[in-house]
Image (cartoon, grey):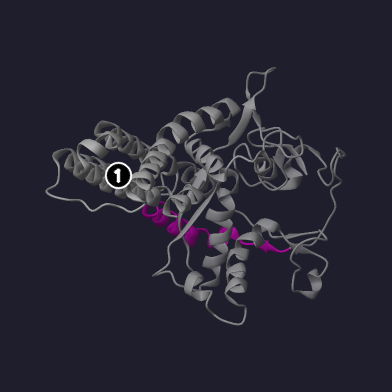
Amino acid sequence: MAGECPMCHFPDAKGDQCDGCGKLINAIELINPKCRAKAGCTATPEVRSSKHIFIDLAKITPDLERWVKKQSADGKWSYNATFFTNNLLKEGLHGRCITRDLKWGTKIPLEEYKDKVFYVWFDAPIGYISITGNYLGAKTDDWKKWWMNPDEVELYQFMGKDNTTFHTVIFPSSLIGTKEPWTMMKTISTTEFLNYEIDEKTGKPKKFSKSRNTGIFGDDAKNTGIPCEVWRYYLLANRPEQQDTVFLWKDFVAKNNNELLANLGNFTNRVLKFLSSSFEGKVPAYEGAKDAKDAAFYKAIYEKFLEFVDLMEQVKIKDSLRTAMAMSSLCNTYLQDNEPWKLAKSDPKRCGNVMNVGVQALHLLAAMLEPFMPSYSAKVYQ
């Protein structure tokens, strides 16, 4: 079911939460509600009585508030996650229905509710734990090493802002309420919305919508034949961390040509090709005392590396990637300034030293970029 949000008046709020303001709502609170049970159905839903199970969020609020206050600071939660969560707590939490009258879903293990299933967003986070148990072997307790080990395990979660509530309120409340030593989330990194191209009529970005066939989705991306590292790079470089961003095909092409190919691809290709053609693919040893140019280069990339690590610790993904690419630019400049292809005949020793530095820099760069583009790094390692 969907309709107008009773609080912010977003026109396409869902029957459990508004994507516009992020607040939890009940389906019967929607203004002008319309059916979403099947494609094309716009009938007005009929309100009926039904018995359900609720989670008592009001009762757990004091414990939840203490956890949120400490963890949002210690874990450096993203601004929108902290903002949404604190707003919900300020307004006051109420009982939240965790069952549904649906045929599909996880059945309620109580005779009285045998024809009902759990609400998907109450059930889904619990699935993080159960899927770990199934992966490790359902007959063992190995899953507890991850999910009941708060002193040794740090849990990071990444998602769009519309799923924040379920991971900072509903799921933590479920865990806290058991009084058991669960591994609680340390850090949550939530994004604003990624939109798709600009609507020619309105001049505004269009919202991604599978039902309206607006946007590009996983199967579409795969069918283009464009390497996965290009997709990953563009989406992470364009990650809507502080504000909404727009997927633009023109920008996608520009970032591939001007950043990936001209910067990272250029350095990678020149180092590995020259190593293969002039050194039989073997990294030459660094001979003699360290050259002043090399020392300056080491210092510059080490500073970039420290900056990168600090940003990664703060879960600033877009800035981390930008810093890694800035280091790639430094590597390109080093190679261009030293021109090992010219040194090969005039000064073979210096040529070998430059290649030693270049290959080591590339190896470090591949390690830094592995969280973003693992397929690229795998190719470099190979």
Residue at the spot 63% in from the left edge and 65% down from the top edge: 127
Q: Quadrant of the C terminus?
A: bottom left
Identity of the amino acid at label 1? Gly
The image quarter containing residue 333 is top left
Which residue position is annotated with label 1?
A: 358
The image quarter containing residue 300 is top left
Whether 300 is drawn above or below 141: the answer is above
- Mark 1 is surrounded, within 10 Å at the Cα level, by few (under 14), some (14 to 19) or many (20 or more) other residues, namely many
Position of residue 42 in the picture relative to residue 28 (left or right): right
Helix, strand or loop at disc 1?
Answer: helix
Along the viewing direction, whichever of 281 and 205 lies nearer the viewer = 281
The image quarter containing residue 74 is bottom left
Residue at the spot 51% in from the left edge and 45% down from the top edge: 190
Q: Residue furthest left?
A: 289
Residue at the spot 73% in from the left edge and 43% down from the top edge: 29
Q: Where is residue 318 shown, x and y percent of the image?
A: 44, 40
Main SS of the magenta part reads: helix
Q: Where is residue 227 shown, x and y percent of the image?
A: 57, 43
Residue at the spot 44% in from the left edge and 38% down from the top edge: 265
The magenta segment: 53-75
Q: Residue furthest bottom?
A: 139
Q: Residue furthest front?
A: 345
* Residue 31 appears in the picture as rendered: yes
Position of residue 363 in the picture relative to residue 215 (left or right): left
Q: Where is residue 164 shown, x and y percent of the image?
A: 56, 49
Please tell me whether residue 257 belongs to the stretch shown in magenta: no
Along the viewing direction, whichever of 93 and 365 lies nearer the viewer = 365
